[in-house]
Amino acid sequence: MIKDSIITFLWSISPFGEAKVGIPYGIFHDLNIFWVLLIAVVANILVFPIMMFFLEHINRTLLRWHAYKTMAIWIARRAKIGSGDKIKKYGFWGLILFVMIPLPGTGVYAGSIAGYIFKVDTKTAFKANAIGIIISSLIVWGTTLFAKGLA
């Protein structure tokens, strides 16, 4: 149980899956369904402050290297293209919508970058990301429970 809880947490904080992978992993490894939801949401919400620290402090130093700068610009463009219209048009609600869609390329990593690029106030961006994460996690959680026959 502890090992699977840790792996669920790590998948949920990982940019390679977020809660979209952590939740199914935990449920299909027979962890308590409510425990899985809690672990995944908390881990995914923790990404935002980590990303803000990275973007505000470490990113500036790393931008001096050409390879990093090229990759950062590519990622920023993807975040801007995927979320730009929603955030410009709907602001806070657009950021929630972008983060809550449980598809690859959306989520808290892209939502944090989009909020940073569009200079959304940090507290507002955190609230929007947290709400989006909770909604997305509930969608994935419900879908996974249904797929496993528990709903």
Image: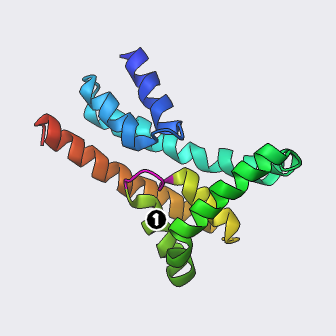
Q: Name the amino acid type tagged 1.
A: Phe
Q: Secondary structure at mark 1?
A: helix
Q: Residues within 10 Å of mark 1 (few under 14, many from 20)?
A: many
Specify how the rendered protein is coloured.
rainbow
Q: Which residue does the image show at 69% across and 63% down from the upper left?
A: 116
Give the quarter of the figure containing the C terminus: top left
Q: Which residue does the image show at 34% across and 34% down from the upper left?
A: 36
Residue 104 colored magenta?
yes
Task: Say left or right for 132 vs 13.
Answer: left
Give the quadrant of residue 79.
bottom right
Give the quadrant of residue 22.
top left
For the record, the magenta segment spans: 102-107
Say how many tags the image has. 1
x, y percentage for residue 60? 85, 52
Q: Residue furthest bottom?
A: 89
Give the quarter of the figure containing the N terminus: top left
x, y percentage for residue 104? 43, 50
Q: Which residue does the image show at 57% across and 43% down from the upper left?
A: 46
Task: Say left or right for 75 vs 53.
Answer: left
Task: Say left or right for 108 vs 61.
Answer: left
Residue occupied by mark 1: 98
Give above or below for 50 relative to 76.
Answer: above
Residue nearest the observer in this picture, 86 or 39? 86
Main secondary-structure element of the magenta-colored stretch: loop
Residue nearest the observer in this picture, 36 or 11? 11
> Can residue 151 be seen by looking at this rendering?
yes
Residue 74 colored magenta?
no
Residue nearest the observer in this picture, 55 or 68? 68
x, y percentage for residue 33? 26, 34
